[in-house]
Amino acid sequence: MLTKGDVTQLFNMLRDKYGTIDEACKRIGIERKTFYNWRIVKQMNLSTKVKVLKTALDELPIETLGFLAKRSRDRTIEILSYLIEALYDTIVHENDPDRLRSLASKSEEVVEEFSVPLTNYLYHEIDNLRKLVFQRVELLMDYPKEYYYKLPFKIRTEDKFEVETEGSQEETEFKYIYSTCTA
């Protein structure tokens, strides 16, 4: 759920886009006084949160989804920290051997479940994005191929490869990157 701080940050992104608080309020569909009341209320009205989020997603989808992904990651880390702390405290005070074995098993499950980087779950999406970036750069930016290795977005893969070249290491890296994105 979005916090008051989250909604305020999304509103500020919209305010920056539209230039004024008044214009942002109009685009969102709230009154200016609603915005100014946020300073004194503890909780925001759910309908206001929905309006701000919907407008932010419609007008600034990449920035909004990036913001939400970071918030989600931060909250997940916080929750996992509490889970690990609860397991730790329970194990420290547990005297029943059967219960201790069960907690040890649960601890291993938690570590195994949450040790995998999120990017592992998104491998294909990330790979497709990287390939698309290089294809679009090649099509639209008219870079000579020898400059591709200078691009900030590099394809990383676990595949083993061999490159025959007499050029520099940078050219070898480029040829590998280029061949993986056009394959």
Image (tube, grey):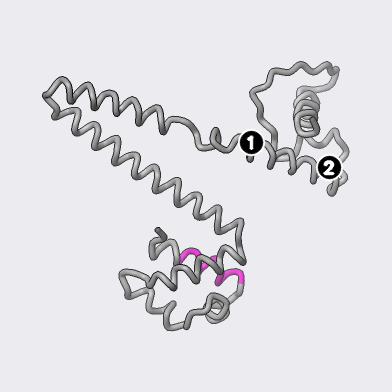
Quadrant location of the C terminus?
Answer: top right
- The secondary structure making up most of the magenta span is helix
Which secondary structure, mark 1? helix
User: Which residue has dot 2 on it?
Assistant: 138
Q: In this rendering, is residue 158 above or below 63?
A: above
User: Callout 1 environment at 10 Å: few (<14), some (14 to 19), or many (20+)?
Assistant: few
Q: Position of residue 28 (x, y in %)?
A: 53, 75
User: Which residue has dot 1 on it?
Assistant: 124
Q: Position of residue 77 (x, y in %)?
A: 39, 42
Observer-side mark, 1 or 2, equals: 1
Q: Are marks 1 and 2 in contact (CB under 8 Å)?
A: no
Residue beneath the point at 50% across and 71% down: 51
Q: Mark 1: which amino acid? A: His
User: Callout 2 environment at 10 Å: few (<14), some (14 to 19), or many (20+)?
Assistant: some
Residue beneath the point at 55% across and 59% down: 64
Q: Does residue 160 appear to the left or right of 67 in the view shown?
A: right
Q: Does residue 13 appear to the left or right of 105 in the view shown?
A: right
Q: Mark 2: which amino acid? A: Glu
Q: Does residue 6 appear to the left or right of 127 in the view shown?
A: left
Q: Is 9 colored magenta in this rendering?
A: yes
Q: Position of residue 174 (x, y in %)?
A: 78, 29
Which secondary structure, mark 2? helix
The quadrant where residue 125 appears:
top right
Q: In this rendering, is residue 25 above or below 82?
A: below
Q: Earlier in the sequence, mark 1 or mark 2?
A: 1
Q: Magenta span covers which residues?
A: 8-17
Q: In this rendering, is residue 136 above or below 26?
A: above
Q: Does residue 132 appear to the left or right of 62 in the view shown?
A: right
Q: Position of residue 49 (x, y in %)?
A: 44, 68
